[in-house]
């Protein structure tokens, strides 16, 4: 959560905006300086607005708020800060390729820090020989192979949620952790 900042320095003087006759009055200038101190944090945020709306620099509580702007509801304490920032930064691109192997791979890369191997079954069978036994399987399944050198801790429930959201809706999936 955001907290009060007692060290905020008033860089803007409301007293300086008053007509000269009031600026000469000591009481009026001391009275106006109270507004300078109270409004310094507000003016600081407004003066640095571009940093609050940039996922690379935004404070963590603002980052969650930015994530809600682009429809991301999966940010929580299990995500490393770097991954949260990357996910919000790349959200529009991820939504444009959602449901594809490329989209799934990019989403998992942001969460895991390593690129997984995605294998699709193809989901169809055919034979060039009439009345012959069909080769393979017609089951639609995605196999995700995650290397053991993953630099981040993996929460299996979160991983499953990411895969479910990013893969084609009609396909089942299985995850294999390689050693």
Image (spheres, rainbow, N blue to C red):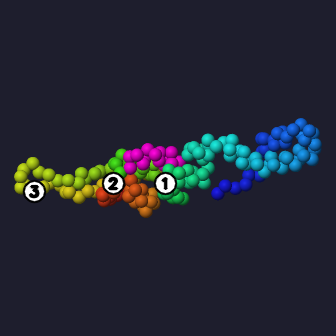
Mark 3 or 1, closer to the camera: 1
Residue 68 position in % (x across, y down): 53, 54
Q: Is residue 89 magenta?
A: yes
Q: Which is nearer the eye, 151 or 119? A: 119
Q: Is residue 26 left or right of residue 35?
A: right
How many numbered circles does the render carry? 3
Q: Which region is colored magenta? A: 79-98
Give me the C-alpha separation between circle 3 and circle 1: 46 Å
> Which residue matches tag 3?
133
Q: Residue at x 93, y 43 (%)?
A: 25
Mark 3 in CB contact with mark 2 (< 8 angstroms): no
Reading the chain from its start, which is encountered first: label 3 or label 1?
1
Q: Residue at x 60, y 51 (%)?
A: 62
Give me the C-alpha separation between circle 1 and circle 2: 18 Å
> Which residue matches tag 2?
168
- At numbered mark 3, what does the secondary structure look like: helix, strand or loop? loop
Q: Judge whether residue 76 can be spotted in this image.
A: yes
Please identify the quadrant where the C terminus is shown. bottom left
Reading the chain from its start, which is encountered first: label 1 or label 2?
1
> Which disc number belongs to residue 72?
1
Give me the C-alpha separation between circle 3 and circle 2: 28 Å
Q: Residue at x 12, y 55 (%)?
A: 134
- At numbered mark 1, what does the secondary structure look like: helix, strand or loop? loop
Q: Is residue 69 left or right of residue 20?
A: left
Residue 148 position in % (x across, y down): 39, 53
Secondary structure mostly seen in magenta is helix
Q: Judge whether residue 178 can be spotted in this image.
A: no
Mark 3 in CB contact with mark 1 (< 8 angstroms): no
């Amino acid at each position: 959560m955001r907290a009060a900042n007692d060290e905020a320095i008033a860089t803007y003087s409301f007293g300086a905006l008053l007509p000269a006759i009031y600026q000469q009055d000591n009481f009026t200038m001391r009275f106006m300086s109270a507004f300078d101190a109270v409004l310094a944090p507000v003016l600081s945020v407004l003066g640095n607005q571009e940093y609050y709306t940039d996922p690379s620099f935004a404070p963590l509580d603002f980052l969650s708020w930015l994530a809600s702007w682009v429809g991301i509801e999966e940010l929580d304490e299990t995500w490393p800060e770097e991954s949260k920032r990357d996910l919000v930064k790349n959200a529009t691109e991820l939504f444009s390729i959602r449901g594809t192997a490329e989209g799934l791979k990019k989403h998992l890369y942001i969460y895991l820090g390593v690129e997984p191997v995605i294998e699709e079954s193809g989901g169809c069978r055919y034979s060039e020989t009439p009345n012959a036994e069909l080769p393979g399987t017609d089951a639609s399944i995605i196999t995700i192979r995650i290397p053991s050198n993953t630099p981040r801790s993996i929460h299996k429930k979160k991983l499953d949620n990411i895969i479910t959201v990013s893969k084609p809706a009609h396909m089942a999936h299985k995850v294999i952790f390689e050693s």
